[in-house]
Amino acid sequence: MKKLSVVLLILVIASLSLTDAFGQPRKNRIGMGPGIGPGWGFDKTPLIERLNLTDAQKDKIAELRTKHQTKMVDLRADLQKSQIALRELKGSKDYNRKNVTAAVEKVNKIKAEIALTAANHRMDVYEILTDEQKEIWRDQPFGFGRKGGRCDFGFGQGYGRGFRGGW
């Protein structure tokens, strides 16, 4: 009888501990989902609108953007070609340290040129702005941002579920 009660007690403890492991997730975990109030969400107002650009500034920025995009297409194509060449080198008879090093250096040189071209484009746009507009620009962590500045942070709906059941 004593053995039976010990075995039953062990089974009850084991089943209770397993229900927590295989049960529903806890409600107070932090994760993707609606926030519980104001948080660091994304500012929906594009930076381009917050700058209040003049028509002349808009035209100049559009011209710069077209030139920049054209150059970036060419650079990205060169990067992809050099990456393909590096990949093809792995299966060829010419696979040696010298050739691989040269191919990797070519890929890295193009990546550096892409980064430098992007930085120069941002500075070209920045130099068109007035002092007040430059201050708005500098206050944004991502500068001009992708898709017209929609990557900028501001107060809004938070990312996670917050600390429900809290601290």
Image (cartoon, grey):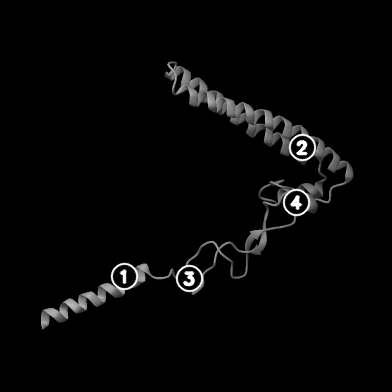
How far, Cα to Cα, is label 1 from label 3?
Answer: 20 Å
Task: Evaluate if marks 1 and 2 touch, with contact meaning CB atoms under 8 Å apart.
Answer: no
Determine which residue is flagged by label 4: 47
**Location of residue 61 in the rendering, given as x and y in whole percent from the top left corner:** 81, 39
Disc 3, SS: loop
Q: Earlier in the sequence, mark 4 or mark 3?
A: 3
Q: Return the mark for residue 18.
A: 1
* Tag 1: amino acid: Leu
How far, Cα to Cα, is label 4 from label 2?
Answer: 15 Å
Q: Which numbered mark, 1 or 4, is in the foreground of this view? A: 1
* Tag 3: amino acid: Asn
The crowding category of the residue bearing disc 1, from other C-alpha atoms within 10 Å (few below 14, some 14 to 19, many at least 20), is few
Q: Residue at x 36, y 71 (%)?
A: 20
The crowding category of the residue bearing disc 2, from other C-alpha atoms within 10 Å (few below 14, some 14 to 19, many at least 20), is some
Q: Residue at x 58, y 29 (%)?
A: 80
Q: Earlier in the sequence, mark 1 or mark 2?
A: 1
Indicate the quadrant where residue 159 lies: bottom right
Task: Evaluate if marks 4 and 2 touch, with contact meaning CB atoms under 8 Å apart.
Answer: no
Residue 114 vertical placement versus 46 (above, below):
above
Disc 4, SS: helix
Q: Residue at x 66, y 64 (%)?
A: 156
Q: Which numbered mark, 1 or 3, is in the foreground of this view? A: 1
Determine which residue is flagged by label 2: 65
How far, Cα to Cα, is label 1 from label 2?
Answer: 59 Å
